[in-house]
Amino acid sequence: MTFDDNPATADPHASAYDSPLGDEGHWAFGSTLLDLQSDDPLAGVDTTVAVGVDHSALGAYCLMLGDDALIMSQQLSKWTAKAPDLEEDVALSNTALDFLGQARLLLARAAAADPSLVPAMPEGSPVPAEDALAFFRDETEFRNVRLVEPDNGDFASTMVRLLVFTVWRLAIFQRLAGSQDRVLAAVAAKGVKEMTYHRDYAARWVVTLSQGTEESHRRTLDALDCWWPLLHELFQTHPIEKSMSDAGVGVDPSVLNAECEDVLATVLAAAQLKEPDVPQMNGPGGRTGTHTESMVPLLAEMQAVARAHPMGSW
């Protein structure tokens, strides 16, 4: 392990894992692989659906991945101008932008694969399909995992959630880069670079906070207890995920369990923390449209301007 367990002497550029970062930029929002500045976010990418792949299942799968990124971006963006210092303010804002970029591409792909997913808009509306999906669906129509929904909490809480989320999502994207769907493969290839940095950034902070003051250690423990009950849901396979995995398009999250647990265990060991002994949140999850109580106010805030001006052009 390349990470120094002593935060006082740790190399701030060292990876928390055995594979250090290369020379890629930390944030890839707006990179040339997929042009996020274009009116068409999928411009230049072959959007043909592979023979034998069910269009509606592909759309539903992209919706799941896109909603995960969209809601995570919304939560992280709340740190803008509120982070502990300027550097972390920039880091969290850029991380939120990376997830927003992923969301735009994935929601656009969902709409292209299955236009019936897009909410009906007034005739002549200038709202693109991906924006309609983001701003004009109700709570039960979202398919994100529940981990991304609750409020951020304090900085330690945000870092623990970001760690858990990026460890899991990076494992998905590393496999998704070989998807039979060219759009998903391109999004994943770009996303792997982003999330490798985000994962290591969060891991470094979890170790630093745990080994810092008595107060920061306590807050890190509280954060683990807060987010750990939502871990189990990440590895529960929805029928759409299974069908897409069988088609060589998506990833069955159940196969990621052991790998993600090993990575999280590595970080916890470096932080001198133990896996919390807390019950898992069971029952229907976000993939089925069942969400936490945080989801309604989150959407009300996120969607307010778009719903107030449904014919607006930005």
Image (spheres, grey):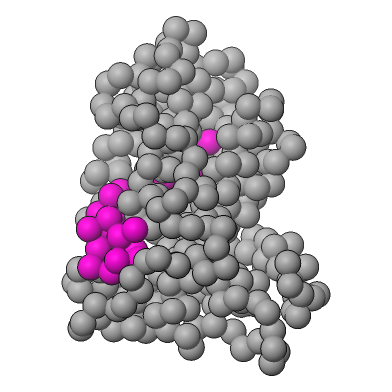
Vertical position of residue 189 compared to residue 218: above or below: below
Tell me which corner region of the image, top left, top right, bottom left or bottom right, holds residue 71: bottom right
129 displayed left or right of 248: right
Residue 164 visible in the displayed image: no
261 displayed left or right of 94: left
Q: Is residue 168 magenta?
A: yes
Q: Residue furthest right?
A: 308
Looking at the rendering, in which quadrant would you find the N terminus? top left
Quick one: 111 or 210, which is closer to the camera?
Answer: 111
Q: Position of residue 231 (x, y in %)?
A: 41, 50
Tell me which corner region of the image, top left, top right, bottom left or bottom right, holds residue 9: top left
Q: Position of residue 264 (x, y in %)?
A: 35, 36
Identity of the residue drawn at 37% across and 29% down: 23
Q: Main secondary structure of the magenta part?
A: helix
Identity of the residue drawn at 33% across and 30% down: 22
Identity of the residue drawn at 63% across and 64% down: 295
Q: Residue furthest top?
A: 9
- Report the span colored magenta: 159-186
25 displayed left or right of 52: right
For the image, the number of numbered tags is: 0
Looking at the rendering, in which quadrant would you find the C terminus? bottom right
Q: Is residue 1 magenta?
A: no
